[in-house]
Image (spheres, rainbow, N blue to C red):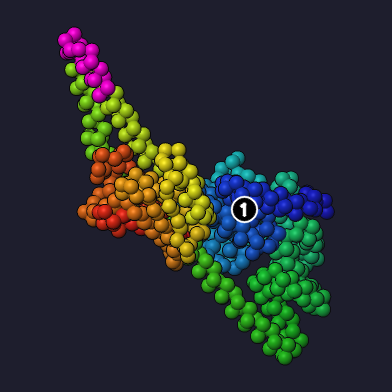
Amino acid sequence: MLLTLPNNYFDDRILLLDEAKSVSESQKDYSRAAVHSYELALIFFQKGDFPNSETYFNKALEYAILLRDKVFQLKVKSRLSVLNLYRGFTETAINSCFEILAFNSEEDSFIAYNILSRVYIQQDEELKSNYYITKADMALEEENMTAEEKCMLSLLMGLMNGHRGWDKTSLQNYNKTYVESRNRKLPYYEAVSLYEAAVVWAKNDVHKECLRLVNDAKEITETYGFKYFEIKCLCLEAHSQRAMGDEKQSLETIATIIDDAIENEFLHLHMEALELKKSILGEKGKKKEIVVIDKEISALDRRINQAGADKIKELLKLKEKELKYQLQKNRALLQQMEDLAALKKVFSHDLKEPLRNIGGYIGKLEKSIDEKSLKKNTEYFRIVKDATVTMDESLTALLNYLSTGSEESGYTKTNLEKVIDSAKEDLHMTLDLSELDLKIESGAELIFECEYRSFYKIFKELISNSVKFVKIGVPPVIRIRAKSDNDTMTFTYKDNGIGIDGEYHDKVFHLFNRLDRSYEGYGVGLATCKRIVNQHGGNIYLQSEEGKGLEVVFTIRKL
């Protein structure tokens, strides 16, 4: 048989994609890393390396969650559903499908309908399977379908027609898939179509034709390393060998299946081989060997059930992580609503006051330009200029506040010392830090995950305040502690400054709220800190007394 791709195609692709993924991760380009992980997962899936496939699918999903890319999340979940179906985790696959359908994505809905119809064909529920096949057929316009989607649909039609007993039509569907896959160089679907056609011939007891097609399919699976379908072909081969009376050859094939299934952890194929072996030995009256096989089957059945339970636990953990992200997103939306309410007051007072000053003094200038001295006019111009500068700086502070967290790059693993260094680097051009005594307390948790581009600004604002609000003649001293528990990281920040009276502990986190206007600033710093902490799913509060330094405690939620 002529093959459509070079033998080392997938191995070369794995090497290239793995290298590209590593580069993307080192550059923190998580969008590309997600795509590379997804493509690697697809290759390992076709090769039958399900553990590696699942690992890379989960990695792609993790990046998609970090990037808040719901479309790509659905794309990955749709493929994970197929993987779970192949591994026998039917309930997990069904739950994922209904989640995908809730978001009405055409491409992913097509795969979800495809999976659901396959499940209900297996469960002999013809009405449900027919319904979802119809939905799959309607999900995408034929002219917009990819070659892979066309193969998937014609395979699905073949399964349904075979289930109904329309074997001739079923074989036509598989032949259509075979031609499409060969023309479009899709060897995986080429092998699957041959296998499914062989199943139809076996069902009709035409075992020579079945074995011919199985051998053709095996040639492709062995060439490209499609291990899962290679073993499925061996299972079908063993059934046909037995049906043709060659029980010895069938048992030898079964032994190969069991070895390969154990090596690749294909639990359900292992179970199928044991059941066939038991049936053959039962006909021979070998009761002692059957007792041993029954024990193996019972142990394997427990493993399959445990694997299903573990899969549900994994799914629940993933859901919990997604819910955490959604909670953070909701917190951010709530913060935006609060900000809009605060802006009404800000624009009515803090920003309009400089404009009123400008308008008032311009009016005075108009009236006095011919009457007052040049010196007086100069004073008016200075006031107008100062009011304009105040207005500009207030707007800049507001825009900086509102832009905080708007360009999220996703959570990354970082070091507390690096965060502090970034904050100090941003401040050293505007503040004198030469006398600053800043230390991270011993025993602090240094490694954690955060949205780095915004998180370091918390310490930038706090350090800035500590340097500004220092006691006269006393160098600023700052101590920082961090500790981790099950769900959160807690940071404690202490300085030796003038402190804040308990009456104002909540007010200082409100936008444009300044307790002492003799100091520079616009009352945005601590409001910015609160905004960033909220976006990380945490809380921030003060523990301070006037004249006794400032202590700020804030948390972020772990992912």
Answer whether residue 537 is magenta in the image: no
377 in the magenta segment:
yes
Residue furthest out toward the top: 370
Residue 165, position as x, y percentages in the image: 63, 63
Question: What residue is at 75 percent from the left and 68 percent from the top?
Answer: 234
Q: Nearer the viewer, residue 331 or 137?
A: 331
Which quadrant would residue 298 be assigned to in this image?
A: bottom right
Taking the image as shown, residue 76 lies to the left or right of residue 14, namely: left
Q: Is residue 279 left or right of residue 112?
A: right
**Residue 464: horizontal and vertical position, in percent?**
38, 45
On the rendered structure, is 341 left or right of 252? left
Q: Which is nearer the eye, 471 or 347?
A: 471
The three-letter amino acid code for the residue at tag 1 is Ser
Q: Quadrant of the N terminus?
A: bottom right
For the stretch drawn in magenta, the main secondary structure is helix
Q: Which residues are magenta?
A: 365-383
Q: Which residue is mark 1?
A: 37
- Residue name at image x 61 percent, y 49 percent: 26
The relative height of residue 58 versus residue 336 in the rendered view (above or below) is below
**How many numbered discs?**
1
Q: Is residue 375 above or below residue 524?
A: above
**Image: 171 above or below 374:** below
Of all residues shown, which one is farthest toward the bottom?
288
